[in-house]
Each structure stands twice: as C-alpha cells, then as structure tokens.
Amino acid sequence: MPIRKAGDLIREAFRENTLNTNRATPIGSGSNGVVYASDQPGYVIKELNVPDGSFRSLEDEANLQSIGAQLGIAPQVAGLEKFPGGVGNRLEMQDIRTNYEPVRSEGDAFGAPGVGSPIDPRVNIQTAQQLGQLALNGVRLEDRRGANIVQNRMTGRPMQIDFGIAGRVTGSEQAATLANATAEGFEAAGLGEMASIYRATVMDLLEGGDVADAMDVAKQGFSRLQKLRGPIS
C-alpha cells in the first residue's frame, strides 16, 4: 500500500469537508441516493445512501450513462468513487443546470413518451428518438419521469439525466426496446394507428422467432421517427 503524504491527507480532508457542506443542501434526492454540488466547479455528485449493488451497480450506471453522453443526450461522466462495503459510493458528472431546466409541463405531469402533458409536445417525440438511439446502442433506459428529463433552455431539446433504471439489451429484447420507443414516438406525434400496426408487426415477428426480421422492421420504423420534428396536424 502506498504511503500517503501529509499534504494529500490535508487536501482530502478539505475536500470531504466541502462535500459534506454541499451534501447538506442537496440539488435533489431519491430513495437510493442524493445529488449535490461537487467541490469541482461545473460538476455534481450522485451519492448512494444504500449499499452499492443492493439495487444495481453504480459502476454499471456510470457505464450506461457514458454511452448516452457519447450520443450527446446525457451528462458527461467525470469519475466514480468506491468505498469499503459499497456504502457512500458516488458518481461525479457534468452539471448541466446552467443550460437545462426541468421539462415544462401542465400540472404535475412531466414529459415522457406517451406520458404527461408537456407544453411543447416535441419533448415526447425527441425523448422517444433518444431512447431509440440508446436501444440501437444496446441500452434500455426506463423511469422517464419527473426530473429525470430536462430540456435545453433555448432549444427545448431534452436530455436524459438518470440512468439508475437501465440495462443492456441484445437480440429480441433489443428489437422490442427499439420498437416500443419508436411506437411511443409515433403516438406522441399523433400517429396512433401507425404506432399500433408497427408495434404489432414487430412483436408478431418476435413471437415467431424471427429476430433478424423484427429488428429490420424496428429499424425501418425508427428511421421514419427520426425524420419527425413535431406532431402531425
């Protein structure tokens, strides 16, 4: 084990004192963790308040969010810290609050494909497009509600900021994930009948074991969804 110098210990103690202060005034909190400002300007920390792995691995979450960040639809991951027993493990990521805000919606509803009543319905379509992008990259992202989706203050473009309920998908599950995201996008655009036919076609192929054909149809539908910029009047 390397010897830790006195200067390193002092810097670490100062950092922990800053983080403890920031933790006392969190940005947000949930059943499994809390989010607060990092000691580094421009970053925030998500810290678990349950043992890591009791629900899912924070490392897995960081890896899945990194895929979203590479696609430009999630905050960049800066680092991951682990502690003995997995208690207090924390994920550091880009602080996007300067340019993003919670999805603007009517009442208590928040934008998510097929759910809620956002003032700008394009949020649902764009969220579905982003979920489809993730599916094509082997990621299923769920729990799209509340503060888990934010939008750019100028353009309204959404960003996905919580990958706590997500997983990797392949084969038939990947095709189904892509199809569901695409169908929800069609529904958000006012193309309910198309969504029903499309979803049923993909699922019928999957039930028949035709995974390759199902994925091909799913991709064709998603290609059409990507061309939509707003609801069809």
Image (cartoon, rainbow, N blue to C red):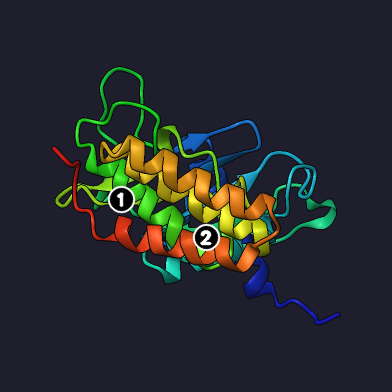
- On screen, residue 29 versus residue 50, left or right, reads left
- Between the C-alphas of marks 1 and 2, the distance is 14 Å
- On screen, residue 193 versus residue 175, left or right, reads left
- In the rendered image, the quadrant that contains the C terminus is top left
Q: Is 7 situated above or below 31? A: below
The residue that mark 1 highlights is: 126
Task: Tell me the residue at 35%/45% (across/down).
Answer: 185
**Is residue 73 visible from the viewing direction of this image?**
no
Task: Tell me the residue at 39%/39% (across/down).
Answer: 113
The one of 223 and 198 positioned closer to us in this rendering: 198
Considering every residue shown, the one lying at the far bottom of the view is 2
Q: Give the amino acid at mark 2.
A: Ala
- In the rendered image, the quadrant that contains the N terminus is bottom right
Q: Give the amino acid at mark 1.
A: Gln
Q: Are marks 1 and 2 in contact (CB under 8 Å)?
A: no
The one of 205 and 44 positioned closer to us in this rendering: 205
Near mark 2 (Cα within 10 A), the count class, few <14, some 14-19 or many ≥20, is many
Residue 58 placed where, x, y %? Answer: 67, 55
Residue 30 placed where, x, y %? Answer: 57, 32
Q: Which mark is residue 27?
A: none
- On screen, residue 101 versus residue 140, left or right, reads left
- Residue at disc 2, secondary structure: helix
- Residue at disc 1, secondary structure: helix
Q: Looking at the rendering, which quadrant does residue 90 occupy?
A: bottom right
**Is residue 98 visible from the viewing direction of this image?**
yes
Task: Tell me the residue at 24%/53% (across/down).
Answer: 99
The residue that mark 2 highlights is: 135
Q: Is 99 situated above or below 231? A: below
Q: Looking at the rendering, which quadrant does residue 5 occupy?
A: bottom right
Q: Return the disc, 1 or 2, that comes first in the chain's sequence.
A: 1
